[in-house]
């Protein structure tokens, strides 16, 4: 089993635990490679470019938060690799393991005592008015909104080529189940169990209060057409890539063949994480 190691950049905590993990693996004769930017910071010997990491290893370990995990998901797509997320702060929805849990979990992985959860991704194609196309794949969410000056934008929605409605709103969020607990949740979208094959369509501050979130099977093609000529209208992909949109452009979403394999925590389930992260109150009823 080969391990890849990466993590949040410019973090002393990440450097410390990455060095410790490298020593731990070396002492046990386990092959590993460190992503080259992190590797240079910790003086690692076995380094690989990020584009080569997923093609070389069996498991990628990510030290950081959910943002770092999402970044790794882009390089992991298309490769038969699993991801372990170690959160150096609190729990994350994707980086499920604390530092104290991390090394015991690696022991379980080496013993073959672990489960993998498959998370679906979305394909996103921007079709320009002149016919040019730009294609992306995302794990979390796709957001269309305006720039620093808040203006309402008109966005027409089609599902499988059939017109549904026109949202007059600050924008719109298309979220996978994985991304349902991020921006979509703060905009009033539902929490979706992470393995369900759906996409949530959530308007941001809609002008008409009856415009509510819609949950659509990810087998459907969702097309959004920009009807308003507003400067600084942007498409944001997983909160990390921004693409400008113009009047007449279309954003076409479809379920992707790409997916991410996440190694699940044996220490808690999804609902334990929800309760912790969202600070739900009330007595916890233990069924055992």
Image: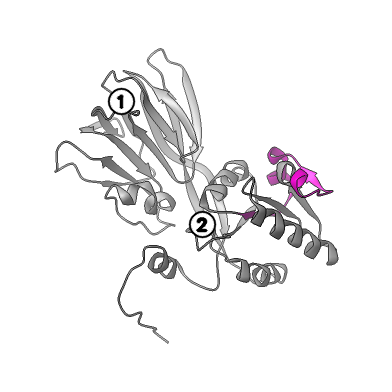
Instruction: Write the start and end of the magenta stretch as one range.
Output: 39-63
Q: Residues within 10 Å of mark 1 (few under 14, many from 20)?
A: many
Local secondary structure at mark 2: loop
Task: Work out how far the residue at label 1 is from the one at label 2, CA to CA, in angstroms.
Answer: 32 Å
In the rendered image, the quadrant that contains the C terminus is bottom left
Residue 174, above or below 190: above
Q: Quadrant of residue 228?
A: top left
Give x and y (percent) for residue 244: 42, 23
| Residue at the image position 61 percent from the left and 55 percent from the top | 83
Residue 45 magenta-drawn? Answer: yes
| Residue at the image position 34 percent from the left and 57 percent from the top | 191
Residue 103, above or below 167: below
Give x and y (percent) for residue 235: 40, 30
Instruction: Indicate which disc residue 225 carries.
Output: 1
Q: Residues within 10 Å of mark 2 (few under 14, many from 20)?
A: many
| Residue at the image position 66 percent from the left and 53 percent from the top | 12
Please give the residue where the numbered disc 2 appears in the rendered image: 94
């Amino acid at each position: 089993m080969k391990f890849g190691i990466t993590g949040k950049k410019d973090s002393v905590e990440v450097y410390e635990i990455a060095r410790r993990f490298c020593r731990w693996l070396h002492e046990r004769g386990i092959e590993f490679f460190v992503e080259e930017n992190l590797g240079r910071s910790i003086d690692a010997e076995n380094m690989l470019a990020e584009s080569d990491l997923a093609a070389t290893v069996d498991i990628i370990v990510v030290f950081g938060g959910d943002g770092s995990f999402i970044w790794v998901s882009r390089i992991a797509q298309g490769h038969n690799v699993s991801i372990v997320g170690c959160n150096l702060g609190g729990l994350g929805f994707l980086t499920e393991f604390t530092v104290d849990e991390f090394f015991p979990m690696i022991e379980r992985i080496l013993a073959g005592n672990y489960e993998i959860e498959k998370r679906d991704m979305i394909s996103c194609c921007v079709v320009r008015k002149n016919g040019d196309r730009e294609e992306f794949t995302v794990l979390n969410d796709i957001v269309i909104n305006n720039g620093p000056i808040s203006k309402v934008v008109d966005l027409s929605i089609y599902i499988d080529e059939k017109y549904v409605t026109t949202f007059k709103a600050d924008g719109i969020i298309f979220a996978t189940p994985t991304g349902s607990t991020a921006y979509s949740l703060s905009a009033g979208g539902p929490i979706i169990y992470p393995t369900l094959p759906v996409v949530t369509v959530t308007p941001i501050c809609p002008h008409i209060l009856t415009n509510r979130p819609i949950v659509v099977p990810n087998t459907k093609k969702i097309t959004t057409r920009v009807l308003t000529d507003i400067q600084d209208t942007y498409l944001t992909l997983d909160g990390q890539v921004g693409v400008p949109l113009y009047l007449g452009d279309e954003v076409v979403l479809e379920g992707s063949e790409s997916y991410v394999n996440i190694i699940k925590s044996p220490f808690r389930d999804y609902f334990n994480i929800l309760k912790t992260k969202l600070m739900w109150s009330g007595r916890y009823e233990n069924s055992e």
